[in-house]
Image (cartoon, helix red, strand yellow):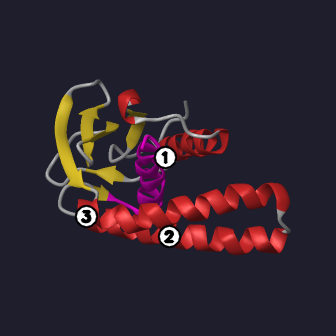
Amino acid sequence: MPQADQTTKQCLVGVTLDPSSLGGGSADQEHERAVAIYDLIERNHFALPGHEGGPYLAHLAMIERRLVFEIREADGEPVITHHLSLTPFRRIVKDYAMVCESYYAAIRTSTPSQIEAIDMGRRGLHDEAAGILVERLASKVEIDFDTARRLFTLIYALHWKG
């Protein structure tokens, strides 16, 4: 697994998803999840305000329709666990699911211009969700926009279950 830039301690060096929170996604979804984790570890900014530690490990789970965001030091020592309401993401997740379904179908049968149009809509929803995530975590975790985009991909993966 790749390592985040070690010149800073304000990063994630590992991300896991709770297996009991995950459902069976399609091959496309599973690939997207794996790529998001890889890219997230490769490059991210992740800092805990007022905490001098790091780098960090993150474990994401869904418990009672809430995101549980468990953060540990790289050596496994617990730091903090945040519970985040996903209510602000409901519409985006629903719309994103529909657009992704259209996108996966389009890449098999549509023209490049049609695929590009659907992908632009998908990226727009992804960007909107990333902005909300940055805002919702602002007092808890400092992340950049690209880190938020990849984290949203993983949050979306936790919705595949049901």
Residue drawn at point x = 25 percent, y = 59 percent: 137
Was residue 127 drawn as part of the magenta stretch in this picture? no
Position of 133 relative to 60 (above/below): below
Residue 127: x and y, percent?
48, 69
Q: Nearer the viewer, residue 87 or 120?
A: 87
Q: Quadrant of residue 103?
A: bottom right
Was residue 159 drawn as part of the magenta stretch in this picture? yes
Local SS, label 3: helix
How far apart are the alpha carbons under marks 1 and 2? 19 Å
What predominant SS class does the magenta segment belong to?
Answer: helix
Residue 110: x and y, percent?
83, 65
Local SS, label 1: helix
| Residue of label 3 | 136
Q: Which mark is residue 40?
A: 1
Question: If the image is split into quadrants, where does the C terminus sit?
Answer: top left
Residue 157 visible in the snapshot: yes
Which residues, given as a range, are shown in magenta?
Answer: 143-162
| Residue of label 2 | 125
**Label 3 close to label 1 by CB (< 8 Å):** no
Q: Nearer the viewer, residue 85 or 23?
A: 23
Tag 2: amino acid: Leu
Position of 76 relative to 142 (above/below): above
